[in-house]
Image (cartoon, rainbow, N blue to C red):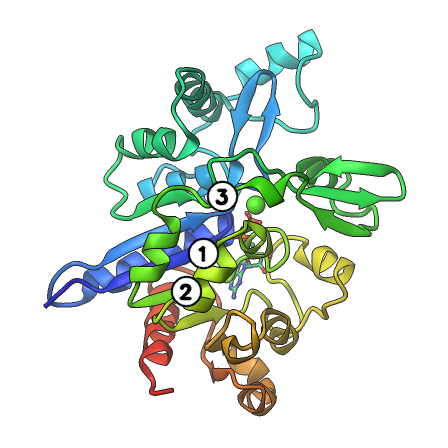
Amino acid sequence: MEPLRVVVLAGGVGGARFVRGLRAHLRSLDGPSADVTVVANTGDDVWLAGLRVTPDLDSLLYTLAGVNDETRGWGRAEETERVAGELAAFGVGWPWFTLGDLDLGTCVARTSMLRDGLPLSAAVQRLAARWPIGVRLLPATDDEVETHVLTDEGELHFEEWWVRTRAALPARAFVQPGVEAARPAPGVVEAIRDADVVLLAPSNPVVSIGTILTIPGIREALAATPAPVVGLSPVIGGSVVRGMADACLTAIGVATDAGAIAQHYGPRSAGGVLDGWLVDEVDAAALPALAAAGIRAGAVPLWMTDDMATAAMAAAALRLAREPR
Ligand code: GDP
Ligand code: CA
C-alpha cells in the first residue's frame, strides 16, 4: 500500500496545532507512514533589524519540533530576551515586536542562508533538518510577498496592524503588493496535484489561508487536483476561539460564522476551493445550507485542546474526504 499523501494549507499557531494533531492521528494508524506536506503562509514575513522573520513557518517548525512555548502560544520555550533589550536600547527594530534570543537565533540562521543565495524553501528545509518534525514544510512561495493592511492611518505591514494596534484600527482591505508576479515555491503545486487529500487547517481564513490562495497557481492547483479538499472551521459558535481573526473577517465582509466562512471559500463545483467542511457540533445548524451549496459538511468537536482532541478532528476531516462525492 502506498502511503497516504496529505497536503495541509496552514497559518501559524492554529495551523501548527492542527498539523501536530494530524501527525498524531497518522502515527496511530497501522500501515505505511503517511506523507504530509504543509504549505505555510508567508504573508506575515517581514524584514526587521536586518533579519528575515517568518512567523508562521517558525510557529510550525517550533510546534512540530516540540520546542515551542505552549502557554504563550508563539516562539520558543524557555526563552530569554537579552538581545531584544539591546536592540531596543539602540532603537533598532519595532519596540512592540519582541523576539526572544532563541527565536532570533533562527532568524539569524535563516537570513544567513538567504544571504548565501538559498531560496526560502531551501532555508526552511535546512532549518527543519535539525529536528525530526515528520512532515515536509514548504513556504507557499519563495518570493517576498507580504500582507499589508489598508487603514485610515495609511498602509501598514500586517504585523504592525496585528501586534502594535492589536487589530483595533479598522482594516479597509488586505493587500499583497507584488503578488501577481509571485510563484508557488517548488513542490507546492506538485504536492497538491499528487495528493490523496488536501486539508485547509482551522487557520485565519483571510490572512493565513486567504493569503496562500492569492499566490498565482495555488488556487488553480486546488481547482485541478483529483484529491478532495476539506477544510476545518476556525470559528466555533460565532467566536474565533483564540486571537483577533474576527477583525480580518469583518474587513472583508464575511461574518464570524462557521457556515459563512465555508460559503466564502466556496464549493469547488462552482469555482471555489472546498469539497468538504467541518464545523463544530454547536454549529450543526449550518449543515443543510452547506449541503445545498454543494459542500459536504459534518459537525464534530473542533476544540484543539490537546493532541488527542486535535487528532480526532484530523481523523474526521480525512473521513469526510473519503465520503463518496
Ligand atoms: P496565526 O498565523 O498564528 O494567526 O495562526 P493561524 O492562522 O494558523 O490560526 C489562527 C486561527 O486558529 C484563529 O484565528 C482561530 O480562529 C483558530 N483557532 C485557534 N484555536 C482553535 C481551536 O482550538 N479550534 C479551532 N477550530 N480553531 C482554532
Ligand atoms: Ca500568521
Q: Earlier in the sequence, mark 1 or mark 2?
A: 1
Horizontal and vertical percent position of residue 27: 20, 60
**Mark 3 vs mark 1: in front:** 3
Q: Earlier in the sequence, mark 3 or mark 1?
A: 1
Horizontal and vertical percent position of residue 297: 48, 83
The image quadrant in which ligand 1 is located: bottom right
Q: Earlier in the sequence, mark 3 or mark 2?
A: 3
Crowding at mark 1 (Cα within 10 Å: few <14, some 14-19, many 20+) = many
Numbered disc total: 3
- Residue under label 1: 9
Q: Quadrant of the C terminus?
A: bottom left
- Residue under label 2: 199
- Residue under label 3: 183
Which amino acid type corresponds to the residue marked 1 in the rendered image?
Answer: Leu
- Helix, strand or loop for disc 2: strand
Q: Which residue: 77% across, 40% down?
A: 165
Q: Is residue 96 left or right of residue 223?
A: right
Q: Is residue 318 left or right of residue 74?
A: left
**Mark 3 vs mark 2: in front:** 3
* Residue 110 visible, this angle: yes
Q: Is residue 233 left or right of residue 159?
A: left
Horizontal and vertical percent position of residue 14: 50, 54
Query: Which of the two residues, 30 or 73, is positioned nearer the viewer here?
Result: 30
Q: Which residue: 64% across, 71% down?
A: 264
